[in-house]
């Protein structure tokens, strides 16, 4: 499958089959992702892939933390309040998601339930947490974004689906405790992944992209 086809067909998946990905395939995918470019080749990503009983235990810890009303305390400053066109696109994305599952704008409880599913990893068999040393700040974040995109496309090439989740960086404490991560490591975001449940209504969600002319300027 060509890269163009992968980009055109890939979408964020929020419902998965229970079937786990074989370890040999995981090894191959994450080995290939090591070819991702990074500034000065520093390769700052430290990826934690959680599955099985450990994933279930962590899911319960995260849900307990979120449901307790504990405020988010992310390791990095990634909580901008979107404005203008960015806010419009955010609303458009949310509308596409909730419309796919029949949740209206007025249904606050339904929206909350849909949001909570982030911390149950959408019942995916695997979740990856993208971490790096905190001092790397914005440059490290750029590299992690490139790495995650590379990983996502390699997964798609192998028939796997995923969903990038900024929400998985909101409550780092239960994750660090479960995975025994050192204090200097920060969790930037996460990604649930596995084999998509193609019959789930929520996976019918599609979002628009800005025309190239509205995003790119050519100077000669």
Image (cartoon, rainbow, N blue to C red):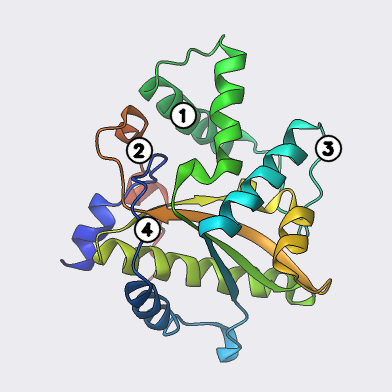
Q: Nearer the viewer, residue 151 or 41?
A: 151
Q: Are marks 4 and 1 in contact (CB under 8 Å)?
A: no
Q: CA distance from mark 3 to mark 4?
A: 31 Å
For discs 4 and 2, the disc positioned in front in the rendered view: 4
User: Which class describes the residues within 10 Å of circle 4: few (<14), some (14-19), or many (20+)?
Assistant: some
User: Residue 192 placed where, x, y %?
Assistant: 48, 53
- Give the residue displayed 46% in from the left and 33% down from the top: 93
Left or right, 216 with respect to 108, comes to: left
- Label 4 SS: loop
- Where disc 3 sits, the SS reads loop
Return the residue at label 4. 20
The local secondary structure at tag 2 comes to loop
Would you say residue 20 is visible in this rendering?
Answer: yes
Residue pointed to by mark 1: 92
Question: Split into 4 quadrants, where in the image is the C terminus?
Answer: bottom left
**Badge nearest the viewer, 3 or 4:** 4
Rendered location of residue 115, percent (x, y): 58, 32
Residue 70's disc number: 3
Label 2 vs 3, first from the N-terminus: 3
* Numbered label attached to residue 208: 2
Query: Dot 3: few (<14), some (14–19), or many (≥20) neighbours within 10 Å?
Result: few
């Amino acid at each position: 499958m060509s890269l163009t086809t992968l980009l055109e067909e890939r979408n964020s998946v929020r419902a998965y089959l229970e079937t786990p990905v074989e370890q040999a395939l995981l090894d191959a995918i994450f080995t290939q992702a090591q070819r991702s470019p990074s500034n000065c080749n520093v390769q700052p990503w430290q990826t934690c892939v959680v599955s099985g009983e450990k994933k279930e235990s962590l899911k319960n810890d995260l849900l307990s933390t979120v449901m307790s009303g504990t405020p988010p305390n992310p390791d990095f400053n990634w909580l901008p309040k979107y404005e203008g066109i960015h806010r419009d696109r955010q609303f458009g994305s949310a509308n596409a998601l909730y419309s796919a599952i029949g949740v209206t704008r007025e249904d606050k409880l339904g929206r909350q339930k849909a949001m909570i599913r982030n911390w149950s990893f959408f019942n995916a068999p695997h979740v990856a947490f993208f971490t790096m040393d905190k001092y790397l700040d914005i440059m490290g974040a750029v590299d992690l974004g490139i790495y995650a995109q590379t990983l996502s496309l390699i997964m798609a090439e192998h028939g796997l689906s995923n969903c990038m989740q900024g929400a998985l960086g909101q409550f780092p404490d239960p994750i660090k405790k479960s995975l025994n991560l050192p204090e200097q490591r920060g969790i930037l975001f996460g990604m649930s992944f596995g084999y998509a449940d193609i019959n789930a209504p929520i996976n019918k969600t599609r979002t628009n992209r800005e025309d190239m002319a509205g995003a790119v300027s050519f100077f000669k």
